[in-house]
Structure formats: structure tokens, C-alpha cells
């Protein structure tokens, strides 16, 4: 094989190995394409989140901005809480009811909801199918639980 034909491989291979060795999500403004079928699901890091929820980070910035998938089993309720930053969420699959500041919204796949900072909200995945959400926040994810 000629060196000119090997050069792209020699350049791309170290970059691919570096990416594989670094499990940190890309930055929020990096170009990327993500497929939900390829998501790597793990339990959330916050121990106070009730068991059953799963997350798959997509991108994040050092200042805390982030985007990622969340998955809830059928019938799961994510308890009432609030965040310091705006939460923008699209429902990918399932049916879910968000209650935000006392008002309920029934979402179906393709629906989009924006939850303002400090708005008390909860999410209930309907029975019958898991719920997958895509959520973006311009700041850190802080969970402030409402008792």
C-alpha cells in the first residue's frame, strides 16, 4: 500500500483511539450525530433519584450545560423537584405526563416542553411502554426535591 493511501488511516486512527479512551461526552457545540438505538444506558449518579430511571449523556460543557437521554420504565414517577436552569425536553417514545407549577401536560412522541428555572415539576410515564426523553439544559443539573 502506498504511503499516500495509508496517511488518512494513520491520521484517523490516533484520533479514534483517543476518543475511545476518553469516555467524557463531547462539548455542547461539537458536531455530532446520535441515535437513541446506540445509547449507553446507566443509572443516574444522583443517589436520591428513585431506582428505575436510566440516563445516557450526549454532550456537556465544563460550565455544566448538558444534553442527554433519560429513560423511565412504564408507570414510573419522577418526583416533584426543580432546577436552577431551564430544562428543554422532547419526548422520543412512550407517553408521559408532566406537571409543571401545578398544571398537567400530556405528551406524546415528538412533543416538546420547556420548564423554566425553579418551576416545580414532576414526570409520570404512562403504563404500557417505557418513556425516552431528550433533555437539554444551559446550566448544571441540580435536583432540588420538593417535599
Image (cartoon, rainbow, N blue to C red):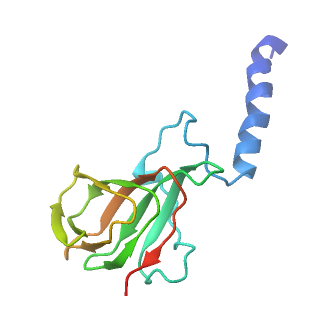
**135, 140: nearer the viewer:** 140
- The image quadrant of residue 54 is bottom left
- The image quadrant of residue 4 is top right
Q: Is residue 85 depicted above or below 103 in this figure? A: above
Q: Is residue 120 left or right of residue 54?
A: left
Q: Is residue 68 visible?
A: yes
In which quadrant will I find the N terminus?
Answer: top right
**In x, y percent, where is residue 32?**
52, 37
Q: Residue furthest bottom?
A: 147
**In x, y percent, where is residue 66?**
52, 52
**In x, y percent, where is residue 57?**
53, 57
Q: Is residue 52 depicted above or below 130 in this figure? A: below
- The image quadrant of residue 127 is bottom left
**29, 35: nearer the viewer:** 29
Name the residue: 51% across, 63% down.
141
Q: Is residue 2 visible?
A: no
Name the residue: 51% across, 68% down.
142
Name the residue: 25% across, 72% down.
125
In which quadrant will I find the C terminus?
Answer: bottom left
Q: In this view, does 7 lie to the left or right of 142?
A: right
Name the residue: 75% across, 51% down.
21
**112, 87: nearer the viewer:** 87
Q: Which residue lies furthest to the front in this view?
A: 118
**122, 3: nearer the viewer:** 122
Q: Which residue lies furthest to the right in this view?
A: 3
Amino acid at each position: 500500500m502506498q504511503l499516500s493511501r495509508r496517511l488518512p488511516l494513520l491520521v484517523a486512527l490516533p484520533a479514534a483511539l483517543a476518543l475511545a479512551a476518553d469516555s467524557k461526552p463531547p462539548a455542547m457545540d461539537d458536531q455530532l450525530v446520535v441515535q437513541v438505538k446506540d445509547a449507553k444506558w446507566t443509572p443516574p449518579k444522583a443517589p436520591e433519584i428513585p431506582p428505575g430511571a436510566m440516563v445516557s449523556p450526549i454532550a456537556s460543557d465544563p460550565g455544566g450545560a448538558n444534553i442527554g437521554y433519560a429513560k423511565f420504565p412504564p408507570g414510573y414517577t419522577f418526583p416533584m423537584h426543580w432546577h436552577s436552569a431551564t430544562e428543554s425536553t422532547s419526548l422520543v417514545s412512550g407517553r408521559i405526563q408532566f406537571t409543571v407549577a401545578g398544571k398537567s401536560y400530556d405528551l406524546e412522541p415528538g412533543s416538546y416542553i420547556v420548564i423554566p428555572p425553579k418551576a416545580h415539576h414532576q414526570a409520570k410515564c404512562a403504563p404500557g411502554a417505557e418513556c425516552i426523553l431528550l433533555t437539554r439544559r444551559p446550566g448544571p443539573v441540580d435536583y432540588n426535591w420538593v417535599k
